[in-house]
Amino acid sequence: MTPQTKINLLISLLISLLMSLAMSAFFSGFFTYLAFGPTPQWLASWAGGFAIGWPIGFLIAVAIGKPVRTIALRLSGVPARAA
């Protein structure tokens, strides 16, 4: 594995980690807020939903990252090697 390949892999994992963190925090918070309103029960449910959702979201992001990138490059017209 070349140094550039290692860097690209690290960047991909960090993007998946941060994106899944943000999406899980937002969506678990938003939908539990809709269910409970601004109550202490909402915060507890949000924390529980986030604790379950983030690892699942991260695994999904890692699993589908490459195919999604390929589709995005094709849709944008950017050659895969240029990106």
Image (cartoon, grey):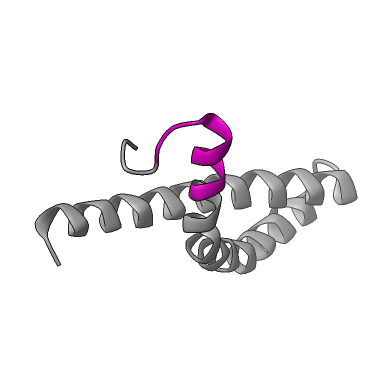
Main SS, magenta residues: helix
Residue name at image x 36 percent, y 53 percent: 12
Q: Position of residue 36 (x, y in %)?
A: 87, 50
Q: How many marks?
A: 0
- The one of 31 and 45 positioned closer to us in this rendering: 31
- The one of 80 and 5 positioned closer to us in this rendering: 80
Above or below: residue 33 compared with residue 76: below
Residue name at image x 26 percent, y 52 percent: 8
Q: Position of residue 11 (x, y in %)?
A: 30, 49
Q: Position of residue 7 (x, y in %)?
A: 20, 52
Residue name at image x 20 percent, y 57 percent: 5
Quadrant location of the N terminus? bottom left
Above or below: residue 1 compared with residue 17: below
Tell whether position 78 is magenta: yes
**Highlighted magenta segment, given as a residue range:** 70-79
Relative to 54, 8 lies left or right: left
Residue extending furthest left?
3
Q: Position of residue 63 (x, y in %)?
A: 52, 66
Residue extending furthest right?
35
Tell whether position 76 is magenta: yes
Quadrant location of the C terminus? top left
- The one of 19 and 26 positioned closer to us in this rendering: 19
Residue name at image x 19 percent, y 59 percent: 6
Relative to 41, 18 lies left or right: left
